[in-house]
Each structure stands twice: as C-alpha cells, then as structure tokens.
Image (cartoon, grey):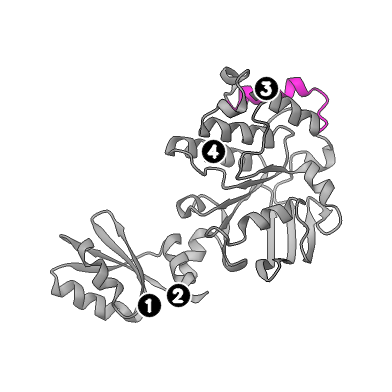
Amino acid sequence: MFTAESVSDNVSASALPGETLVAVVDVTKHFGDRIAVENLELNLCAGEVFGLVGANGGGKTTTLRILAGILKSDRGRGYVLGLDLAHEGSEIRKHIGYMSQRFSLYSDLTVYQNLRFRADVYGLRSPGVAATTAMREFELEPFARRRARQLSGGWARRLQLAAALIHSPKLIFLDEPTAGLDAASRHEVWRRIGRMAVQGAGVIVSSHDLAEAERCSRAALLAEGRVVASGTPDEIARDASGTAFLLSGADARRLQESVDRTAGVIASYPQGASLRIVADPEAAAALDALANANNLNCSRAAMRLEDAVLAFSKQS
C-alpha cells in the first residue's frame, strides 16, 4: 500500500499476521421499531477479506457504519483496532479506511485536491507527496486536474478507494465497492482488495453480489439485520439445508414454471442452457419424474453460495 506516514504508527502500522483487528459481540441497532442489526458477533484478523452479504436493507451498511465508529449501537461491546467500540468511535474513525457506497468526496475539487485534502484530514506530514503517490498507485495521474464530478463511474470509485487508503490503514471497510462498475473495473477493485489483504490489512466488504462474495475468505449472510449463516463460502454452501439439482437437455429452461410448482422446490434459475434448482432433498423423486417425462436429465450438483442464500431465505 502507500508509503505515506500514518497518523499513529501503533494503530495504523502494518498488522501482524493473525492479529485480531475486530472483535465484537451482541451488536444491536434499531431505528424506531425496525431492526437494523441484531446480536451481531464478528471477528476479523489481519490478512482476511470478510464479506457482509445480503439484500438491500439487510443491515450491511449499518454494520459497517457501527464498526467504523460513525454510528453508535444501541447495545453491544467489543474492540476495533484495540479501541473500545462503545466509547472510542471518534478515535476509530481516524485509523480505519472507509469507502461509502455513495460518492463521498468533493465534486467541485480536482482529483489531486481531493486526495491532498484527505491527506491533510488524516494528519500526514507531507500531504502533497501522499496525494501524488496515491494518484500514481491508482493510475489517476492523467486526471489530476479534472474535477471529481467529471470522472466516469469507474474512475470515481477508484478515486474514492485511493482516498480511503491514503493513510495506509490496516483495517478497511468497503461498502458495495463495485456498485455500478463494468466487469473490468470490478476485477480491478477486487485485485486491489486481494493485494491489501496479502500485505496484511483486514478488509470487510459489503455486497449483494454473490459471485463477489465467493472471493471473500469468510462471509456472513445477513437477513433483516440478523446473521443467518457464516463461515467460508464453501462452509456456508455445505451447511445449507437445501440440495442443488441441474435439469439439462433440450429446452430444459422451458420447464421452469412446472419445476417451481413442484413440492419441495425452493427456487430455480437458468444456468446456461440448463435449469439449476434448489430444493429439499425429498423433491428428488418428483424432479426425476418430471425430467423423465420430458426426456431430460436431472442430476445433483454441488451447492454454491447463491444456492445457500436461497435455501436460507426460506428459513428466515
């Protein structure tokens, strides 16, 4: 990451391998009668990429804002970078990197001015050098004098990420970092996330994109503010109660409505020319009969994270 000097060496210096960066329990937040986050327990070590996965409104952003010291929880305890979550939120904010889903920089300032301002905010001794280094690292030099509002979506997200990392934090929170980006830009963001983890940072990423969640070392599935499953993506898929089937053959996809009406079927969705089905194990006989009646093949498949989410959604 960047070589610019941090605000506090003992908090923002490179993390030790396996060092615990986040450890919180029973974190709960209500907005009126609505549960935003309930009884959250989360641990993150240096070098990990942890995914908060779920639909919009599931509690992902609220969780990140609480962990970042931006929002105070109603209940809960724990530490972020060794700082007390309940009482040291302002100190936590100084030492983490936080990238919000919405564009949070100054649209009328240039790329260079935004980065220099952020370096000033973090108290770096040479903010101009830090801004120049960040532009070089994120390939933003051709846009140095361009106002932030003139950047395309991909370059704007890259600028946000550069600003979030300019003080070399060892703990980074990214809220939907690839929202609205094309495939190449998404790949670039994830390449950088992987590099940060290899260099020892801990990263928590919120996403509703299950393909991206597969890139995380561990993840938690959130539904209505509650964690319904957690572990590695493979563990979550393995522990789901459903079974995956693949219906293949000519025109398999035309049977989707019939499949969805079959007892025990949780959901189905196209997979190439085939139809992927998530169902209770007891649905196997009925699906085999449907396949045989239509000269198709029905076989069991390994559960994927997307299948697990569909299975857990039935339980919640």
What is the tally of numbered marks visible in this picture?
4
Foreground of the two, 267 or 130: 267
Q: Is residue 8 above or below residue 25?
A: above
* Magenta extent: 122-138
Marks 1 and 2 sit apart, C-alpha to C-alpha, by: 7 Å
Sooner in the amino-acid sequence: mark 1 or mark 2: 2
The residue wearing badge 1 is: 280
Q: Earlier in the sequence, mark 1 or mark 4?
A: 4
Residue type (three-letter) at the residue carrying disc 1:
Asp
For label 1, the SS is loop
**Residue marked by disc 4:** 189
Between label 2 and label 4, give the one nearer the viewer: 4
**Between residues 229 and 116, which one lies in front from this camera angle?**
116
SS class, disc 4:
helix
Residue 240 appears in the rendering: no
Circle on res. 112 = 3
Q: Which residue is at 54% across, 30% downward?
A: 155
Using the rendered view, name the quadrant where residue 105 is placed: top right
Give the spatial CA distance, label 3 vs label 2: 51 Å
Q: Give the quarter of the figure containing the N terminus.
A: top right
Residue 12 rendering spot, x and y as whole percentages: 78, 40
